[in-house]
Amino acid sequence: MAYTNSSMVAYTKLSSNHSGQRTHSIDRITPHCVVGQLSAESICSCFVSSSVQASCNYGIGTDGRVSLCVEEKNRSWCSSSNTNDQRAVTIECASDKAEPYGMNSTVYANLIKLCTDICRRNGKSKLLWFADKNKTLNYAPKSDEMVITVHRWFANKSCPGDWLYARLSDLAFKVTAALGSTTDTPSADTSVLYRVRKTWADSKSQKGAYKILANAKKCADENAGYSVFDESGKTIYASASGLSPYMVRVAIADLNIRRGPGTNYAKTGQFTGVGNFTIMEESAGQGASKWGRLKSGAGWISLDYCNRV
Ligand SMILES: [Zn+2]
């Protein structure tokens, strides 16, 4: 397929910071936060000097206008990954200067339009977002699929910032809908993304962002010292802070497993059986001096029937 450029482009100032023609066809889009509420022109001017050693294919200025810095046919220097940039169209979006690197609604609306246009011209009918680095980088897109990747997977930085990261599912959904396709990935309700980090302020420590709380808890359990935060930064789960998982011995065969820490929670109908079990979290609760949450995810048991081993 012949490479073209977007007709949305309102300003062109080509940068010489690129590697020439791509060695891989386009099947990724990597949106970035440019760290500043810059105009379309200013985004291009960031990449004019050869000493900068950086560029992007497109910029979206703070008023939503689109600029072209590196033609789509060429590999830009944008995402700290040769492999990624060979196959990705890179887009620098006007953003605030600090986390969460917020973007205004015009920039976001035009990012949706530009991604739709890029997909359409490159023969794609779906834009996919997996929210998972390994899954994405190991995924072989079908011929009509475009996949979103993010700079933070390739370098120790927050880019595209938490504001846009939280909307990538929404972006993929809206672009796919505009292309006339449907997708299995539902539009994310951005108010319910659960983030796993060491602390809320330390966004670079983020292990993942999950729509399902249980998955976020599991991730926190697997990473000592990590907690789960809601969209506002409130800690909603902190199993690993203050408590290292430990092993207990259960000597009775019929110790009930309950859905929560207390006899006021329903029995799951399962018993631990005799054996050794790993406790991930402790809690006070009715009917026992202390309750422990099983690593298996099966539920909670009374620690009165356990001996630490
Ligand atoms: Zn970036």
Image: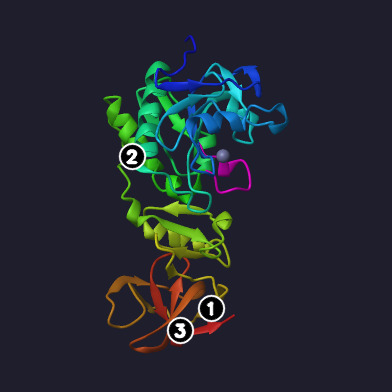
Question: Mark 3 near mark 1, Cβ–Cβ under 8 Å?
Answer: yes
Q: Crowding at label 1, few (<14), some or many (≥20) Cα neighbours within 10 Å?
A: some
Q: What kind of element bears circle 2?
A: loop
Q: Residue at x 46, y 60 (%)?
A: 218
Picture quadrant of residue 77: top right
Q: Nearer the viewer, residue 101 or 82?
A: 101
Instruction: Report ligand 1 position as a quadrant.
Output: top right
Q: Nearer the viewer, residue 307 or 156?
A: 156
Q: What kind of element bears circle 3?
A: helix
Total marks in image: 3
Q: Residue at x 37, y 32 (%)?
A: 110
Q: Is residue 105 left or right of residue 5?
A: left
| Image height of 192 relative to 25, above or below | below
Task: State whether residue 53 appears in this view.
Answer: yes
Q: Residue at x 61, y 33 (%)?
A: 46
Ranked by sequence position, the earlier of labels 3 and 1 is 1
Q: Which residue is mark 3?
A: 303
Q: Is residue 36 left or right of residue 254?
A: right
Q: Is residue 151 magenta?
A: yes
Q: Is residue 171 magenta?
A: no
Q: Main secondary structure of the magenta part?
A: loop
Q: Nearer the viewer, mark 1 or mark 2?
A: 2
Mark 2 C-beta closer than 8 Å to ligand 1? no
Q: Amino acid at mark 3?
A: Leu
Q: What label sits on residue 185 in the rendered view?
A: 2
Q: Crowding at label 3, few (<14), some or many (≥20) Cα neighbours within 10 Å?
A: many
Residue 204 place in picture, x, y as percent: 58, 54
Q: Which residues are magenta?
A: 149-159
Picture quadrant of residue 298: bottom left
Q: What label sits on residue 248 in the rendered view?
A: 1
